[in-house]
Structure formats: structure tokens, C-alpha cells
Image: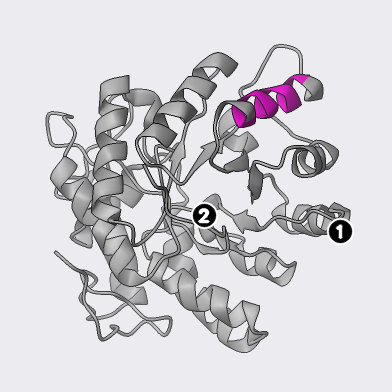
């Protein structure tokens, strides 16, 4: 199967996995979500990450989601698939499966071991790279993995493993780490993408990051933010960031309930259910979220694309 080429610069939303009220996969909503992302002009999408509840899915469900994403993307945008597993052999197998189904890349992060070992982490990435022919996003997200990868290790991944085509910098404080990574890269340089719900995005961009791979529910806003930063229009970039910061902060509460509810409010998915033992949003928090949306985007129909100034864009999302 031919994979869509990918540059790893720009905006790559990490997508939720929709379920119905009985916690069954809602593939129709997932297809609509992927199509909406392509319509808004993102540079790619990432599925089956932490936000996608990958650890609550069986292998058959993973296959269905990957196949649905590839079909819905229809070659317009690349699809990156999270394939991390606590075992190296299993990560390799999941990565091979994603490639066989048409993924353009995989996102991989190591798993915590009783005794930290940088060499084992390097071998983990090397074995995954040897098992596939598509690129790897090396995700550094100690908040979810409890794995702290030194700058030197990340730079070694870039220098010695050609398949590592992007670093997803989510270890805090992220801005100085972006600087250290960019300064430390030698002849081989790869893009650095921000995560963490875009919470520190403006600061990462000021340090030279290349965009976002994150789950913020208004990814179309991150597109002009990234473009403004890339062209040095920092006043504009800061205006966009300040405008949407309350939503960014509210989304960063623990769990997936808030973000899934936003995706539901936007019409991307039919149900905000989080698969057990995760918690679906409660009524009071849902109302608080609605209040934040109304303050940031007063009177706006958020089922339509939103521009960086908070006004509705001309085009609508596809069906």
C-alpha cells in the first residue's frame, strides 16, 4: 500500500477514539473526524495515542481504526499511528501492522522499566526502525510514560537512526529542551513538534519548534499560529495564543472527558463516552466548559471552522 509522504512540520492533531454509550467503537464518527481534519488543512493526523485510549483497545479494534483513518484521509493527509507497547517485539509487530494498513508513520515512546537504561531505550527505537520502512516520531512524554529521556539520548536517536524523522518534545520545561535539541543536532536535523495540548506552544515556537502534534480541539487555530511564528509575525502569534489560552488551559485537566466533550460539541463525534475505567465528563464540568467556550467564542457556531481571530472561517467542515 502506498503511504502519503510526510514532512513533520506544521499541525498534526492527535485524535480521540469515539465510542457509543455502550463503549463500542463509533467508526462513523471517527471517519467524520478524520475527514474534518483534512478539510481544515492540517498537515496530518495521529491516532492511537494516549488521547486515543490505545491502551483500552484490542488488536481488532486497532485495525478497524487504522483502516477507517486511512480510508477517510483518502490520500489528502498522512496518518501517523501510535504503536508503543511495553515489549519491544510487540511494538515492532504493531508498527509493521500499521505500515501494512497504510500508515505514513508511527509514533513511539518507551515504557518505564524498574532500572532506567538509556542503552535499552536506544535499542528499542533501533529495533522498531529495523522492522519497518516508514518514519518514526520519537515521543518524549514522561508525564504518561514515567520515562525521562536525556537530551543526549534524543540526539543520539536522531544521529544514528535515520528512521527517526521527528521529535515530539513534551518533557517539561519544554522550551529550553527545544533549544538544547536544536543546538545539539549535527549534520542531520529533524523537526521538533510541541504537544501538551499546546499549553506551552508559543514558547516552544519562540525557541524554534516546527509546529504541533497535540490534541487541542481547535487545531485549525494552531495553523495560523504556526504560520505567524514561522514568518516572524510574533505580535499576531501572541494574539492568537492569548485568545485561545483559556480553552487550552481548561482542556489540560486530567483525563480525556473535557476534550471528548469539546469534540462532541463541535459535531465531530456523536458521544463523549470515555472507555472504562476512564471518566466521562460530569454535568457541572460540561457546563463550565460551555461557559469557557462562550467567553472565548461568544455567539460563534463551533461546528464550523474557527479562524485565528476567533471568527468563523468561510469554509465549513465536510460531512
Is the magenta region chiefly helix, strand or loop?
A: helix
**Residue farthest to the front?**
1
Q: Is 121 part of what is drawn in magenta?
A: yes
- 92 vs 234, left or right, is left
Rendered position, 222 above or below 119: below
Q: State which quadrant residue 159 falls in.
A: top right
Q: How is the image coloured?
A: one colour
Quick one: SS at disc 2?
A: loop
Task: State which tag comes first along the sequence, 1 or 2.
Answer: 1
- Residue stretch in magenta: 120-129
Are discs 1 and 2 less than 8 Å apart at CB?
no
In the rendered image, residue 30, in percent from the top left (x then y), is placed at 23, 47
Q: State which quadrant residue 124 falls in.
A: top right
Mark 2 crowd level (few <14, some 14–19, many ≥20, 10 Å Cα): many
Quick one: SS at disc 1?
A: helix
The residue identified by callout 1 is 183
Q: How many marks?
A: 2
Residue 87 in view here = no
- 12 vs 36, left or right, is right
Determine the residue positioned at 56% across, 73% down. 226
Rendered position, 189 above or below 139: below
Foreground residue among 241 and 319: 319
Determine the residue positioned at 16% across, 30% down. 24
Q: Is 202 part of what is drawn in magenta?
A: no
Mark sitting on residue 194? none
Determine the residue positioned at 27% across, 39% down. 67
Quadrant where the N terminus sits is top left
The residue identified by callout 2 is 213
Amino acid at each position: 500500500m502506498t503511504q502519503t509522504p510526510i514532512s513533520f512540520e506544521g499541525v498534526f492533531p492527535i485524535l480521540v477514539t469515539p465510542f457509543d454509550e455502550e463503549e463500542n467503537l463509533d467508526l462513523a464518527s471517527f471517519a467524520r473526524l478524520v475527514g474534518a481534519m483534512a478539510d481544515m488543512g492540517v498537515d496530518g493526523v495521529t491516532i492511537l495515542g494516549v488521547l486515543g485510549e490505545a491502551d483500552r483497545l484490542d488488536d481488532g479494534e486497532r485495525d478497524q481504526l487504522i483502516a477507517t483513518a486511512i480510508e477517510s484521509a483518502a490520500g489528502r493527509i498522512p496518518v501517523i499511528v501510535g504503536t508503543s507497547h511495553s515489549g519491544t517485539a510487540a511494538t515492532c509487530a504493531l508498527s509493521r501492522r500499521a505500515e501494512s494498513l497504510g500508515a505514513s508513520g508511527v509514533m513511539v515512546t518507551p515504557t518505564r522499566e524498574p532500572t532506567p537504561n538509556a542503552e535499552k531505550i536506544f535499542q528499542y527505537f533501533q529495533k522498531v526502525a529495523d522492522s519497518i520502512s516508514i518514519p518514526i516520531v520519537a515521543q518524549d512524554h514522561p508525564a504518561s510514560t514515567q520515562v525521562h529521556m536525556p537530551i543526549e539520548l534524543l540526539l543520539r536517536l536522531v544521529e544514528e537512526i535515520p528512521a527517526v524523522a521527528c521529535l515530539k518534545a513534551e518533557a517539561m520545561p519544554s522550551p529550553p529542551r527545544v533549544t538544547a535539541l536544536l543546538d545539539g543536532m549535527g549534520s542531520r536535523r529533524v523537526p521538533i513538534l510541541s504537544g501538551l495540548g499546546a499549553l506551552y506552544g508559543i514558547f516552544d515556537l519562540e525557541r524554534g519548534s516546527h509546529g504541533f502534534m497535540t490534541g487541542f480541539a481547535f487545531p485549525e487555530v494552531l495553523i495560523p499560529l504556526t504560520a505567524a511564528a514561522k514568518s516572524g509575525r510574533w505580535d499576531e502569534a501572541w494574539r492568537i495564543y492569548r485568545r485561545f489560552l483559556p480553552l487550552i488551559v481548561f482542556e489540560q485537566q486530567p483525563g480525556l472527558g473535557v476534550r471528548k466533550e469539546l469534540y462532541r460539541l463541535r459535531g465531530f463525534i456523536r458521544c463523549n463516552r470515555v472507555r472504562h475505567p476512564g471518566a466521562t465528563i460530569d454535568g457541572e464540568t460540561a457546563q463550565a466548559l460551555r461557559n469557557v467556550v462562550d467567553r472565548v467564542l461568544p455567539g460563534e457556531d463551533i461546528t464550523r471552522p474557527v479562524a485565528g481571530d476567533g471568527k468563523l472561517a468561510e469554509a465549513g467542515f465536510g460531512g
